[in-house]
Image (tube, helix red, strand yellow):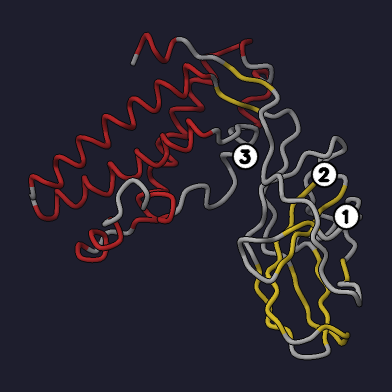
Amino acid sequence: MALFTDPDIVTLDDLLPFEASLGQVASSHGIDVDGKIAVAMNAIGDRLMLWLLNAGASDPQWLTRRVLGLSTVVVTSALHRWICFESLARVFAEAYNVQLNTRYQGKWNEYQQQAKNAANLFFLAGVGIVYAPLPKPALPLVSVQSGTTPAQTIFVQTAWVDSSGNESALSDANAISMPNSSSIAVAMNEGALQAPSAAVGWNIYAGTAAQTLSRQNMAPLVIGAAWDMPASGLISGAQPINGQMPSFYIALANEIRRG
């Protein structure tokens, strides 16, 4: 699971299963969907931060919560749905305000209610947090060098790893077209100086299709070191974990009473 402070937690692709025509609606009315998602994230973040502060000692990190902010909050499936519905409500609110179309008003009201329900369920289930957050890495650095691999396109993603084997969310994929008789070297964009404090190494996932990446290293790679593709090419390794599971859940019952 991603962290709340990771980039691109929700994108247009996440909203399309709920509203297949969203792209067309946004295009025809000049609506910036990414902007609406950002506004929704800010609104949810403010509300979530307030409730964490009100949770007091129920939050094991309450003494440092103002410093930590939301950097240790995990985006559970319930929180992800809330962000999606809140984003959709804001898109259709603007569509209605532009066109004064009652169909858009109906969608706006529907997703507003869905967002409220999702928020209540999220707080009832509890806010998931981690004690040692691993932020999503930046786009990995991939360079082509001489080698023995035939011409092909390789997709590469990376993840930070902690001492318990937990992984961050995967970086965005870097696709590289390799000429014949070549190889690649991969490094973390952050280098050693900007690695998260909880990280003890990193993993590389690669494949010839974006949907079928697998881990290429048997043990976590040293922070600051690069990975070189072996002469034998890519291997079929483990599948990505793609994010941390919560270490603790904070149930905020007050959210239900005040909702």
Q: Kindly report which numbered mark, 3 or 2, lies closer to the viewer in this rendering.
A: 3
Compare marks 3 and 1 and give the one earlier in the sequence: 3
Q: Amino acid at mark 1?
A: Ile
Q: Kindly report which numbered mark, 3 or 1, lies closer to the viewer in this rendering.
A: 3
For the residues labelled 2 and 1, say whether their Cβ atoms are less than 8 Å apart: yes
Q: Residue furthest bottom?
A: 180
Front residue of 106 and 41: 106
Eyeballing the image, is 235 above or below 121?
A: below
Q: Amino acid at mark 3?
A: Met
Q: For residue 223, which numbered disc appears in the image?
A: 1
Q: Is residue 73 rendered to the left or right of residue 188?
A: left
Eyeballing the image, is 38 above or below 141?
A: above
CA gap, disc 3 to disc 2? 16 Å
Front residue of 136 and 239: 239
In percent of width and height, residue 43 lies at 40, 36
CA gap, disc 3 to disc 1? 22 Å
In percent of width and height, residue 110 lies at 22, 35
In percent of width and height, residue 163 lies at 88, 38
Q: Is residue 75 rendered to the left or right of residue 107?
A: right
SS of the residue at dot 2?
loop
For the residues labelled 3 and 2, say whether their Cβ atoms are less than 8 Å apart: no
- Disc 3 designates what residue? 1
Eyeballing the image, is 31 above or below 146?
A: above
Quarter where residue 161 is shown:
top right
Identify the residue at image location x=40%, y=26%. 119
Q: Quadrant of the N terminus?
A: top right
Identify the residue at image location x=83%, y=89%. 181
Identify the residue at image location x=54%, y=19%. 126
- Disc 2 designates what residue? 199
Q: Quadrant of the C terminus?
A: top left
SS of the residue at dot 3?
loop
